[in-house]
């Protein structure tokens, strides 16, 4: 398998990837430290953006 691209890592972090593709990329992440690091950074970014969005939504609903 080739290294996953940033869009694939983002889809994986968001939970929006097809199961077969998800399994393939997760196997790769288990073997490739560079991609595993990139995925962790992507997950952290996605989590921060989701938290910021929730905060904005809370303010507008408050």
Image (spheres, grey):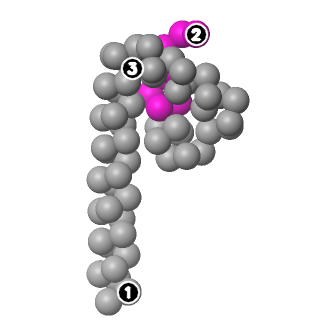
- Between residue 22 and residue 57, name the one nearer to us: 22
Task: State which quadrant residue 60 falls in.
Answer: bottom left
Q: Secondary structure at mark 2?
A: loop
Is residue 16 left or right of 46 when viewed as pictured?
right
Q: What's the residue at 62%, 39% (across, down)? A: 17
Q: Gap in Å between the C-alphas at discs 1 and 2?
A: 45 Å
Instruction: Check the picture and name the quadrant holding the N terminus.
Output: top right
Q: Earlier in the sequence, mark 3 or mark 1?
A: 3
Image disc number at residue 61: 1
Distance from Cα at disc 3 to Cα at disc 2? 12 Å
Residue appearing at x 68%, y 37% in the figure: 18
Q: Which mark is residue 35?
A: 3
Q: Residue at x 52, y 27 (%)?
A: 26
Disc 3 to disc 1, how far (Cα)?
38 Å
Tell me the quarter of the image containing the C terminus.
bottom left
Question: Residue 33 or 62: which is nearer the viewer?
Answer: 33
Q: Position of residue 2 (x, y in %)?
A: 54, 10
Q: Secondary structure at mark 1?
A: helix
Image location (x, y in percent) of residue 35 = 39, 20
* Mark 1 Cα shell of 10 Å, populated few (<14), some (14-19), many (≥20): few
The residue identified by callout 2 is 1
Point out the tag, 3 or 2, that comes first from the N-terminus: 2
Q: Name the element at disc 3.
A: helix
Count of numbered marks: 3
Q: Which residues are magenta?
A: 1-9
Residue 7 x/y as whole percent: 50, 31
Compared to 15, does 34 lie above or below?
above
Q: In the image, what residue occupies the spot 39% across and 31% down?
A: 39
Classify residue 23 as left or right of residue 11: right
Look at discs 1 and 2 and give the one toward the viewer. 2
Is 27 rendered above or below residue 12? above
């Amino acid at each position: 398998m080739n290294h996953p691209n940033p869009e694939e890592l983002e889809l994986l972090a968001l939970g929006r990837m097809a199961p077969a593709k998800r399994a393939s990329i997760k196997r790769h992440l288990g073997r490739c430290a560079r991609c595993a690091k990139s995925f962790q950074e992507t997950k952290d970014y996605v989590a921060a953006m989701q938290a910021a969005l929730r905060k904005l939504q809370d303010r507008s609903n408050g």
